[in-house]
Amino acid sequence: DVKVTQSSRYLVKRTGEKVFLECVQDMDHENMFWYRQDPGLGLRLIYFSYDVKMKEKGDIPEGYSVSREKKERFSLILESASTNQTSMYLCASSSYWDRDYEQYFGPGTRLTVT
Amino acid sequence: AQSVTQPDIHITVSEGASLELRCNYSYGATPYLFWYVQSPGQGLQLLLKYFSGDTLVQGIKGFEAEFKRSQSSFNLRKPSVHWSDAAEYFCAVGAGSGGSNYKLTFGKGTLLTVNP
């Protein structure tokens, strides 16, 4: 079974803090994704990565950055957290070789910025 | 660019009743289509997917979906709903030229409530 894990299920941070959200997958997938999920807005893509050290902006990259130093790990960074970044963050991965776009999701991190 | 519309934000059904969740997509070629389910506080789990072949797709938990190209639809169905089906359901479309472009576009979701 593909397993995608996220470092925290719940996180509370203060405005202005630097926040790291970690995601690890164990299936040697090339593609990894970060989404945020808000009520009524569905899933919105923040960033994705298709290889180590490679990244591309998604639909809402403002206020976020990412890091992928190893194939299995994809980190989302909030350089200076703001209250409007309070949300559920979902990480996903997929295989380049499957070529069918199926993504496997982690359990999510619910981030609250106060 | 591709897009997905789930017209129903919230649906309530009685346990044992049939269910149909609607999904319409916009994409010029044959899309890859998915239904995911999210239980409260959890990540997304794949129910089923379509990318070629038989337009009626069977998934897990007794769900099925039918791809109708003429209507640009991929509706999810279940003949008899169980209380444990209460969750949020997301339709998604994958499209693009491959390579680094294996992204999914998600609908905004349909929340399903099941009454006893």
Image (cartoon, coloured by chain):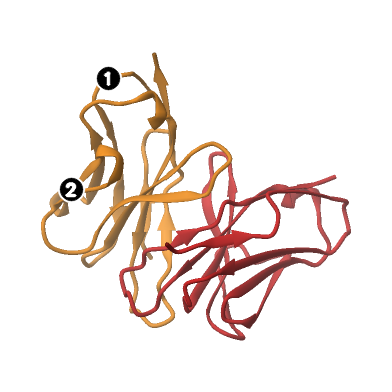
Chain colours: A red, B orange
**In the image: residue A98, left or right of residue A54:** left
Q: Which mark is residue B71?
A: 2
Image quadrant in which the C terminus of chain B is located: top left
State the image quarter where residue A75 is shown: bottom right
Between B83 and B31, the residue placed more toward the observer is: B83
Q: Mark 1 is on which residue type?
A: Gly
The amino acid type found where label 2 is placed reads Gln
Residue at 59% over, 60% down: A5
Classed neighbour count for the residue bearing mark 2: other residues with Cα under 10 Å, few (<14), some (14–19), many (≥20): few
Upstream in sequence: badge 1 or badge 2: 1
Q: Residue at x 45, y 61 (%)?
A: A104
Residue A24: where, in percent of width, then height? 60, 68
Residue wearing tag 1: B16
Q: Label 1 lies in what chain?
A: B
Distance, label 1 to label 2, CA atoms, is 28 Å
The answer to whether B30 is drawn above or below residue B73 in the figure is below
Helix, strand or loop under label 1: loop
Residue B86 in the image: state x and y as whole percent: 43, 29
Residue drawn at point x = 88 percent, y = 51 percent: A14
Q: Nearer the viewer, mark 1 or mark 2?
A: 1
Whole-percent x, y for residue B65 in the image: 22, 45
Q: Residue at x 32, y 54 (%)?
A: B34
Check disc 2 and report its element: helix, strand or loop. helix
Q: Chain of mark 2?
A: B
> Which residue is the extreme one toward the front?
A1
For residue B43, above or below residue B28: above
Determine if marks 1 and 2 fall on one subunit: yes
Viewer-closest of B85 and A114: B85
Which percent across, then down, holds residue A22?
68, 65
Q: Quadrant of the N terminus of chain B?
A: bottom left
Q: Is residue B9 left or right of residue A88?
A: left
Q: Circles 1 and 2: CB distance less than 8 Å?
A: no
